[in-house]
Image (cartoon, grey):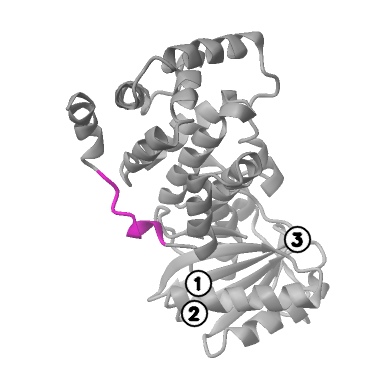
Amino acid sequence: MTTSSNAHPPVRITSYVDFCQVIPLMLGFRPHDSLVLVLISNRTMAMAARFDLPDTGAVAIEVARHCADLADRHDADEAVLIGCTDTPAGVWGLLDQIDTGLGSIPTHLLVTDHHRYWQGPDDPGRLLPEDAVAGTDRFAGRPVLNSREDLADTVVGPDRVTDRITEVIAEAEQFNDHLTVTEQMSLLHELIIESLGVADLSLESRVIAAVLVDDPFVREHARLSITHDTAADHVTLWGRVVEVAPDEIATGPLCLLAMAAWLTGHGALMQVCLERAGWLSPDDEMVLHLSLLAEAAVDPRTWPGRSDVHESWRDDAVS
């Protein structure tokens, strides 16, 4: 399941065409063979959740229960169910099943293949305006990709671990071994302060950051430094670190990228980060904690952040 919250910039929705356009914007990719549940509360989009189209009746029942649970948790008073598929005729039964599970909540059903949309099984379909399709190339400063697989490919790490990456990792680990945890925190603090908002980070800085947050305690302090105001910059920072982090030092950067993605409302990016991190380190405490946040579709606005952390880290490090 992929979730996306209302931490996005405001988007005005007045038609089914708007819904077809906004779903890729919220998810960060164009969903295929997917069911998307959009929950609305007080005329505001509360969240969107994407599921693979169920391939069995048992899975469909589980998805229907999960949708009903999400609607209850987010106090939804309206919902939109969207089947994203190239074969619209086969998805209406599933939409009806989930609509029934949502109970008395008014629910609108829609199917799209990202070029056309249908409002019912007997609807011959309507073409989406070209500007609706063309307008989904970028949102909130980030690209909208063609598929979830394309999004997952952005967090797989380096195509090849070069000799230089190996060399920098060895140097960073040797240096790190001689630092106390407090000194590691102080060094990471300096790296974060220097790197936020900087697009062109050196390979050395990125590898050192990955090595530092391999320590769970240092990583937790880095997580606490991510606030709503700085989350977008942290997405850039930790995304750049993940690009050069081979498997042995990737879990920490992936967790911090997932955390920052959650706070920016990019639930799909959070999910693909946690999938790789969970494969690499299935028992890691932060991986498990963030996975629970993602599974429960917790609203990122509930995160208080620690706006004082950046300022206090240096004081903490020398006290």
Q: Main secondary structure of the magenta part?
A: loop
Q: Residue 135's spot in the image, x, y percent?
A: 57, 48
Q: Is residue 258 left or right of residue 247?
A: left
Residue 200 in sight here: no
Give the mark count. Answer: 3
Distance between the Cα atoms at labels 2 and 1?
A: 6 Å
Type of the residue with mark 1:
Leu
Q: Residues within 10 Å of mark 3 (few under 14, many from 20)?
A: some
Describe the element under mark 2 as helix, strand or loop. Answer: strand
Type of the residue with mark 3:
Asp
Q: Residue at x 70, y 24 (%)?
A: 159
**Numbered badge on residue 33:** 3
Q: Residue at x 57, y 47 (%)?
A: 283
**Vertical position of residue 196 compared to residue 144: above or below:** above
Magenta stretch, residue numbers: 299-306
Q: Are marks 2 and 3 in contact (CB under 8 Å)?
A: no
Q: Quadrant of the C terminus?
A: top left
**Numbered badge on residue 214:** none
Q: Is residue 66 left or right of residue 160?
A: left
Residue located farthest toward the bottom when viewing the structure as drawn: 104
Distance between the Cα atoms at labels 1 and 3?
A: 20 Å
Describe the element under mark 1 as helix, strand or loop. Answer: strand
Q: Are marks 2 and 1 in contact (CB under 8 Å)?
A: yes
Q: Which residue is mark 1?
A: 39
| N-term-proximal mark, 2 vs 1 | 1
Q: Residue at x 47, y 79 (%)?
A: 72
Type of the residue with mark 2:
Glu
Q: Which residue is mark 2?
A: 78
Q: Quadrant of residue 83?
A: bottom right
